[in-house]
Amino acid sequence: MADCHTNTEAADAMFARYGAAMPDFGHWNATLATLMRHRSVRAFTDRPIPEGVVETLVAAAQSAATSSNMQTWSVIAVTDAAMRANFSAWANDQAHVKQAPLVLVWLADLSRSERIGAAQGREMITLPYTEMAMVAMIDAALAAQNATVAAESLGLGTCYLGALRNKPQAVAEALGLPAQCFPVFGLCIGWPDPARPSEIRPRLPQSVVLHHERYDISQEAAGIALYDERFTAHQRQVGLPPSGWVARMIERIGTMRGLNGREIMRGALAALGFPFH
Ligand SMILES: Cc1cc2nc3c(=O)[nH]c(=O)nc-3n(C[C@H](O)[C@H](O)[C@H](O)COP(=O)(O)O)c2cc1C
């Protein structure tokens, strides 16, 4: 499989991801091409998703590593238009949620572990601890990302829907979730609308995120300044207001607006059976 594409393809993919040339690493394959082609898709056609696709995506998801093979996640495949309209409303009216024929809701699911213990007459005493909540959320995220890559390899478009956490209790009630089962995020899936394509979003330079041997911020400020310029150019190119990345981070992380009402998360988690002991 390795080297089945040209180095030009590798160089182009790197350029698209960073907005700059990267050192040629000499190896390229279909998996890397799929991963590096990723972009969130927020415009879908009416074309339905063929039978068997959901099962294929879930098989890919279940192929992800899972902490101690505990498999503390579940997923709900939602196609019902009324439910997708609810999700859209709870997610600040994101239109593509109604348009996507399929929304997968990824669950951190400790309820199954509780039932397994109950069937054996055992109390699963570690379930209320923070570590177990982390395990379940990490497992759910790894599974979802495998499904995302699988979907993209089939030509489908995807968009995560973290905004489901704007109303976790409403989502839990609507989907009939038992206690100890938390909707971590949704994943919208459908065929990308070629009339409204999405572009690859450049990422931070590796000098900012990759450290060698020890944490090192010596390149950070320069790397972020460079990225801000590249991201602004990208915003212009795709017709978005050229606010820059740093300004977006200030808005997202430095204001309460950025939390979209999710400051209630600790209470919502406790109400849904995640007390974080
Ligand atoms: C956990 C998670 C939650 C997200 N939630 C949303 C969302 O609610 N709505 C949305 O349009 N995009 C959402 N996204 C997509 C991100 O905005 C997107 O991945 C990011 O801007 C980078 O763009 P790209 O995926 O096109 O590379 C989410 C992504 C992740 C990983």
Image: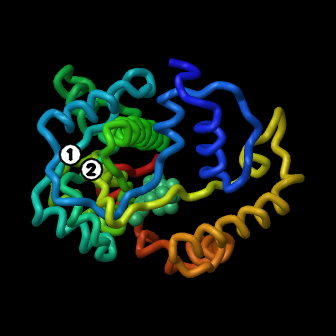
Residue 108 placement, left or right of 203:
left
Q: Quadrant of residue 244?
A: bottom right
Tell me, yes or no, whether the two marked residues, 1 and 2, touch with CB atoms within 8 Å: yes
Looking at the rendered structure, the secondary structure element under dot 1 is strand
How much space separates mark 1 and mark 2, taking CA atoms? 5 Å
* Residue marked by disc 2: 105
Q: Residue 108 at x, y = what percent?
A: 34, 43
Establish if 243 lies above or below 14.
Answer: below
Q: Looking at the rendered structure, which numbered label has been put on residue 130?
A: none
Residue for point 79% across, 66% down: 225
Q: Quadrant of residue 203?
A: bottom right
Residue for point 40% across, 51% down: 275
Residue 108 placement, left or right of 228:
left
At label 1, the amino acid type is: Ile
> Quick one: label 1 or label 2, which is nearer the N terminus?
1
* Residue marked by disc 1: 76
Q: Residue 20 at x, y = what percent?
A: 72, 53
Q: How many marks?
A: 2
Quadrant of ligand 1 in image: bottom left
Q: Are there few (<14), some (14-19), or many (20+) residues within 10 Å of tag 2?
A: many
At label 2, the amino acid type is: Val
Query: How has the structure been colored for display?
Result: rainbow
Residue for point 37% across, 42% down: 152
Q: Is residue 32 visible?
A: yes
Establish if 65 lies above or below 19.
Answer: above
